[in-house]
Image: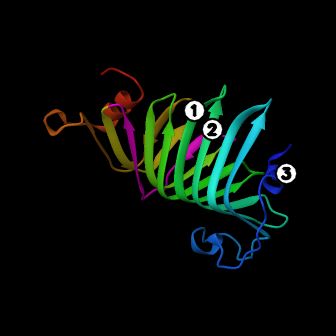
Amino acid sequence: MNKKSLFYSAIPIFLLSSCSIKYDVFKNAEEEVPEFVFENTKLVRYENNEPVLELSAQTLEQYKNKSEIYGKKTGFKSFEDGEVDNQGSCDYFFTDTDKELYKLAGNIEFQNKSENMTFYANKLMWDSKTEQLTGTKNDYVRIQKDDAIITGKGFSSSGISKSFEFSGEVSGQIGKDKDSEEQLTEDEAETKLSGGAE
C-alpha cells in the first residue's frame, strides 16, 4: 500500500468548516481549500509487516490532486528494526510526499535516539532524498547531547556524514550545573557533540 492510500484508508474523513492551517503558517502555499480534513488521528506506515513511520496529529489536511499534507499539533516517530529511532513533535507540519520534503514549525522537539541527541527549534526542514536537516538563517537551533548544549543560527545537518554545522553565531556549554559550565567555540562544540574527545 502506498503512502497516499494510507492517508485515505486509515482514518475517517471530515469536511473543512474552518480556516486552513495552510493559510496561517505556510505563507508560500497556494490559497485553496483542503479536500479532506482528518481530526485526532494516528497513521502508521508499514514495510515488511514492521512499522517504519508513525504520525499523529490534532488536524491533518489533504489537498486534491496534490501530494501535500498539512498538520497541526503533530507528533511523529520513525522505527529501525521495530524500535523507535527518531521521535518528535511540533505545532505545525507540512509534507510533500512526492518530493519527500518535510517542514516543521513552532515548538519543535526532535530526538535522535541512536545518536542520543535532542534538537529544539522553531523552524526545521528535512529532505528525505538528500538526508539533510536544516534550519533557517536567522532562527536558533539548540542541540543537547549528554551534558553538552550548543545553540546557533544557520543550522544544517547531514544524515549521511552524521555531521552538522552552523553558518551564523553559535555558543555552547558543557556541564549541567553552573560550577561546571564551560563556554565552547564552534569547533569544540562540534567535537563534543559528534562524540570526539571529551
Q: Which mark is residue 5?
A: 3
Q: Is 8 or 22 nearer to us in this picture?
A: 8
Q: What secondary structure is marked by label 2?
A: strand
Q: What secondary structure is marked by label 1?
A: strand
Residue 32 is left or right of residue 143, and the answer is right
State if disc 2 and disc 1 touch (CB < 8 Å).
yes
Write down the quadrant of residue 182 in the picture. Answer: top left
Q: Horizontal and vertical percent for residue 90?
A: 52, 55
Question: Could you tell me if residue 159 is visible in this image?
Answer: no
Can you identify the residue that label 2 sits on?
Answer: 78
Magenta stretch: includes residue 147: no
Q: In the rendered structure, which disc, 1 or 2, sits on the residue that comes first in sequence? A: 2
The part of the chain drawn in magenta is 128-146
Residue 140 against residue 113 in the figure, above or below: below
Q: Amino acid at mark 1?
A: Asp
Write down the quadrant of residue 161 in the picture. Answer: top right
Residue 180 is left or right of residue 105, and the answer is left
Residue drawn 68% across the image and 41% down it: 53
Q: Horizontal and vertical percent for residue 132?
A: 59, 42
Q: What secondary structure is marked by label 3?
A: helix
Can you identify the residue that label 1 sits on?
Answer: 85
Q: Horizontal and vertical percent for residue 35?
A: 80, 70
Q: In the rendered structure, which disc, 3 or 1, sits on the residue that comes first in sequence? A: 3
**CA neighbours of label 3 inside 10 A, class few (<14), some (14 to 19), many (20+):** few
Quarter of the C terminus within the rendering: top left
